[in-house]
Every structure is written in structure tokens, then in C-alpha cells.
Image: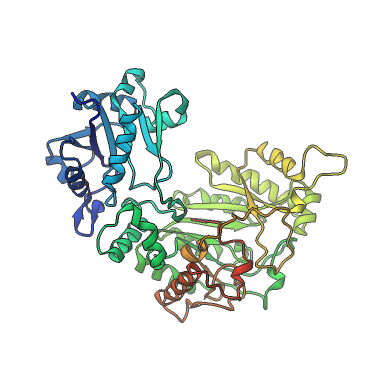
Amino acid sequence: MDDTRVDIIIYIDENLSDSMLEFRGEFTPLLIFSKVKSALPETSIYYSVPSSYDGILKSEVNLIIRESTDDVNYWKEIFTKTSSPHIAVIKGDSPFFDTDVLKEMSELHTKYLAEFTYSENLPEGFTCEIVSGELMDQLPEIKEKSLPLSKVIKSNINQFDVELYYREPDIRDKRISFRLSNPRDKRIMENLAEAKGGIPHYSEIRDIIRNNPSVVFTAPSYLEIEITGECSLDCIFCYRKTLAQAHSRMSIETMKKIIEEMRDFALPYTVCFGGSGEPADHPDFYALMDLVCGEPLAEQLIIETNGIKADANFKSYLSAPERAKIKIIINNNGMDQASYLRLHGSDSFDKIFNNIISLNELNGSGERVYIQIMKINETDEFSAGDEQRSYLDKFYDFWEGYKVPIILQKQNTYSGRIKDRRYSDLSPLKRIPCWHLQRDLYILSDGTAAYCKQDIDGERAYGNINSNPLKEILNNQKEAFTQNYSDKFPSKPDCRTCDEWYTFNF
């Protein structure tokens, strides 16, 4: 037997139907089969499908039906059935899979007698994982269900002979998974294939995007919607006082129009109720949440709130199963009455504290409620006589004592409109195209689609959702994104001085 032979398993994940595996008129598992056979004709190829699968692969001869996850016991069974010395696992929803990568990874794996070979710099859909049959002899039988084999190895990497495969160019900064299971990434792959005139090789991806940046612009994955400009607090880092005029309330009709027109893009997205005001101060707050919860494409609804009205009624509302998609971020920099008054200009700490502790009970079945503290001078200073622990350290100790999840937020100065309270600049040295122009849409309370979140008065708006079709608005944003990709920046908002370009939502 050839001990250097690497056989292939085309692995079909749970819940992937045949229709989801179609790409540009081809069935992806068979496309991968054809690619591999053309490049490595002597290789044996198998299909691994879950027991629930009932598609066209059921008629394939080399079919392996999984009764459980790809844990250690599954892999022992695979090597017993195939008698393969090494097996490479290729995800079956990867139409861009590159056989040049497979060849190079196989050579690396067999040359250095590795037990496991994988890549960290290649995005999903272009790479594979290679397992050695000899590894099976080292692994004990496990009766109970366990983690997938790859996770076991990666979490105990020093116990195994592992090879890491690296290949240029590194395109991790594009944050694209080249797999069909993600509808947004599938749309980007379709755009790339159209721009190339066929499926491109891995080495071509970065140049295609550089020359055609619009291929990565699909539709908003993150909608930040300002449902009101009203708020009872006076936080030291708030930009509300710098607005040209106070922002009003969004109508239910405007919210309905946003949701209805997002359906035209048929892509999942996240909604955030944020902006200059306190969402819970809107008189139709619950009705607006209901609209988002009732929309299947809206996968999450994030409420950024000061927590004053996050009371028992709010908790009861969130507890209903149909509101499970709602997550709460309570903007709270205080841990007692004095600190809250100093940072938020209000004596509401006791009420907010009680609301947080009560809402935190919802985290029993998964994190849904967070508190968010801003990383600024005032929250990381040292008290007089205390040179060991900063305010931020004490804040973490206090809230972690109640087991409340904490988010550390970077300050946004809105291009210098408010006082810069940051004590460090964490911006990457090399600028990349703005994530927010590519993936976000910021809508003000009157329906204005602002240039971005820095355009707090909507001075450089793409249009208004009440008078312009959303497709027209997004075409205008696409143009702004492609200009940004070419380092052409507007002066309003001042993109050159903005440091929000590298932050990422969803």
C-alpha cells in the first residue's frame, strides 16, 4: 500500500439540502469530485453525509452515512472502512476549492509525517484538513459524544505532530468564508465568478477584489436604526448636544418600509436600535421590536439602552420564545451612585442596577444581556492612593461578581465632534477599506440614510427611506464604498481623520 496516498472525503454538513449546494447551475459536491479526479486521478473519493440527508448523493457508491458528529469514534470508523493511510476532508459546499492547495497540503503532510495538517491563513472553502490513519492508534475509544476531532487536536496541539499550511496572498482581512452555507458569502462568490468569467483560483481573489471592489458589496448585514433622539441622561461622551437639531421619533410606517424593502435582497441581517437617543423612550418601542422579531431575515435585534426602563415588564417581554433573537446592551459605566452620576449625569444607578441583575437571569440559557463600559480616561484612571487597580479593574471585578457579561467599548469621537477621552490609539498601522461602508447602513429617526454613523446629521445622505427606494440608496452607498476602496475620501464626514474604519459589527 502507498503510505503517501491521501484520499478524500467530501463532507456534507447537517441541514444542507441539495438546493443549497447548487452554485451557478452545478452541484458543488460533484464539482469538487470532478476537480479532484482531474488533478489526482488515483485518489479515492468518499462522501460523508448525515443520516438525515436524502439527496442525490444517496446513490453514490462511496457513501458514508454519519450517525453522529465527526468525533474520535467516527474517525476510527472512517479509517477502518476506507483503509486509507491519510484522508483530506473537503467541505461539500466549497465550489471555489482549489486543488493546487490540496496538492501542496498533501505534500507537506506526507513529507513531514504529520498526524494532522490544516491552514490558519486560508479562508474556509479554499482549504481542507488532513488526518493520518496512524493518529487513530493514539486515540482512546470514547463512549460518550465528544468534540469534533479537529477541535480536540487544535486544543491539545502540542500533543500531536501537526503541520500548519500557509499560502500567499493572505486574504483573511476580507472576512469572507467561501462556503455556500452562508448566503451572503455565496452572493460574494457569485459576484467573483461573474467578474472572472468562471470560478477563480485562490491566487486571483485579491486582485479581482482590488480591481472590482463592488463584488464584496452585497446588502447591509447590520442596520443601525435610530428610532428616537430622546434621552434623559447627560453622559460625558454623548454627541447628542452637537447635533444641528434634535432628532425626533421614527414612525412605525418607516420601520415597516425598511423591513419590507430589505426582503428584496433575500439576505439575513442584524438590526440595532441605537443612534442618538434611548430606544425605550419611544412610545411605540414594543411595537417596533415586534416588527423586527416577526421578520425571518432579521436574525438578531440588538437594543442599546441605558437600562432605566429595562424593568420587569421589559424582562417579561423578552422572556417570550418569539423574542429570543433580541439581545440587550446596557450602556453603563458606573458601579455605584457616585460614579454613575459623574459619568452619566444622573442618580439612576440603583434603578439600573436592579434592572441589570434581574435581566441577567435571562442569560441562564445563553448570553442575551450585556453591560458595556467605554474605554476612556475617566474609566481607567487610578484612585488616589491606589496604584494597583484602576477604575476599570474594579468595574470588572464588581460586575463579574454578579456574572454579568461585559463589553469593552472603544470611544467614537465622531471625527472630533466631541472631546477625545481616549488614552491610547489602537488603530492598525495599515488602513483597509471601511467595514461600515461595506456592511452597515445607518438610518436616522426621520428615515435619512446617512453616509455612515459619523454622519450624525445626515449631511451626506444617500437618500431617505420614505422617499427613495432602498435599492437606490444602496447603489449610492456602493459608489461611496468603491471610492473609499480607492482611497478617495470625502471631507464631510471627514473619512481621513476617522478611526472607525477597522471596527466591525456583523
Viewer-closest of 80 and 70: 80
Rendered view: 171 above or below 8: below
Q: Nearer the viewer, residue 6 or 450?
A: 6
Task: Pick whichever, 94 or 17, lies toward us.
Answer: 94
**Based on the displayed image, in which of its 4 quarters is residue 415 positioned?**
bottom right
Where residue 103 appears, as percent x and y from the top left, is 28, 40
Residue at x 67% of width, y 78% of height: 245
Does any portion of residue 37 appear in the rendered image? yes
One can see residue 70 in this view? no
Residue 399 in percent (x, y) is at: 68, 41
Q: Position of residue 445 (x, y in %)?
A: 57, 72
> In screen coordinates, is 357 left or right of 295?
right
Asked if residue 381 is positioned above or below residue 412 in the image, the reply reads above
Where is residue 390? Give x, y as percent: 77, 43
Q: Above or below — where is 347 with respect to 225?
A: above
Q: Quadrant of residue 48?
A: top left
Q: Classify residue 418 by image quadrant.
A: bottom right
Q: Please report the residue visible at 71 percent of the width from the left and 39 percent of the height from the top.
A: 398
Residue sitting farthest toward the front: 111
Q: How many marks?
A: 0
Q: Residue at x 30, y 30 (%)?
A: 110
